Amino acid sequence: MLPEDLRQAADTYVTGGEFAAELARAVAHRTVSSDPSGRPHVLAYLTGQLAPTLRDSGFAVTAHDDAPAPFLLATRREDPDLPTVLLYGHADVVDVSIPWRADLDPWVLTREGERWYGRGSADNKGQHLLNLAALRLLLAHRGRLGFNVTVLVESAGEVGSPGLAEFAAAHREDLRADVLVASDGPRVAADRPTLFLGTRAAAQVHLDVDLRPDARHAGNWGGVLRNPATTLAGAVASLVDGHGRLQVPALQAPPVDDEVRAALQAVPAPEVSPGWGDPDRTPAERLHAGNTLEVLALGAGDVDHPVGAIPGRARAVLQFRYVAGTDVSRLEEVLREHLEERGFAEVGVSAHGEPASRTPLPDPWVRWARSVLEPATDGRLVVLPSLGGTLPNGVFTDVLGLPTLWVPHSYPGCGQHAADEHLPVEVARDGLRTVLALFAALGNDSGPRQ
């Protein structure tokens, strides 16, 4: 448990204005990674805000202005015999193309009631700023951390982290650590501290039925010319039926083992559409231990101004989300073979997926983290084998060979990737207490006994 004075210091940091001031500076940097004009803002945030803060805490800091996106790497070494923690965060944000409320400026932190509004407040600036604050608070309390720390902040997390795996491989020695501790994504609920150990991966699937350069009169040609839209609709239904059930046997999720099933029993039930999804899995198992194929976009002709003509082309974009253990090495071939077997050889397919990853529940670092966080959160902790969303977990497990502990400081309704993004004050306060308890315990007992 946290000493009372350290707990009070954490609460004061969040509620006394210091965190809001830091977060306001961070939000003001328009670090949109999907827009090339965001790159100078990224560098300003990394070198002008994060780097000085880290140096003040005894870190050696290096900024890497590499293509395709900049990185910040910082290290603090107290003792080579102590464990090393790798912290990760991303400096970039999504754009603000979806209109925000008229009284909110996405680039100005605004407090309204018990929420801070601003782009990046929850995803991800607010989260990694809380983790860095936990280190400062522990240093102020003890004069030392009791472990070594490396901080890695990338700036392309919102566009799939291009270059992150290559950077990690090239700087493997600099990034050598015993465990990753990071905060991204949401808790399962605002009042439920969450520890997740990996993520589902995502692959975009493009289907294209391009049959002729022009449309043809539906009366004169209907019934003799293949309709690409009808063909596409049938192809999609052969992949995922009208009730959201995946129809490709080779892409089904692996069975849920007993330990994962037991962990997911404690997950609060998500909002559920009756009759949707795999009936043999609970909603939590579908979301955190299942595979899904979602239609993101589907188009042919002009829906707003239809004419009596058979379109010449139809296209769809789907997203396949999958858990660790799913073989995606032949994803495109599997989909093409499936469609051809069902008479849809006209459908062009483009798809590629990287393996999903997670740290096993029995891992010593996972058991240690649970032993710390369950009492520290008064039994409110939820442990997820995998987050439903996607993060670059595989870079840390597969490239760097690390166990991964993700402790998010947000919640499902935060508006990340949408309008009116916000971070609740209480989630920030509870999140800081949670990660501070983890760091304090690590400094006391040096982590799990291997």
Image (cartoon, grey):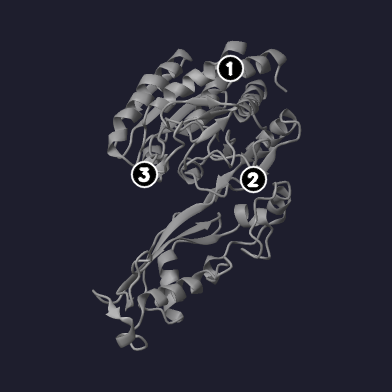
Q: Position of residue 113 (x, y in %)?
A: 59, 26
Q: Secondary structure at mark 2?
A: strand
Which residue appears at 32% of the width and 74% of the height?
A: 311
Q: Is residue 120 above or below residue 340?
A: above
Foreground residue among 337 and 24: 24
**Amino acid bearing label 1:** Tyr
Which residue appears at 26% of the width and 76% of the height?
A: 212
Foreground residue among 324 and 39: 39
Foreground residue among 174 and 64: 64
User: Is residue 284 visible to the viewer in this orientation of the structure?
Assistant: yes
Q: Which residue is mark 1?
A: 13
Q: Is residue 430 above or below residue 359?
A: above
Q: Which residue is mark 2?
A: 384
Q: Residues within 10 Å of mark 1 (few under 14, many from 20)?
A: some
The image quarter containing residue 340 is bottom left
Marks 3 and 2 sit apart, C-alpha to C-alpha, by: 26 Å
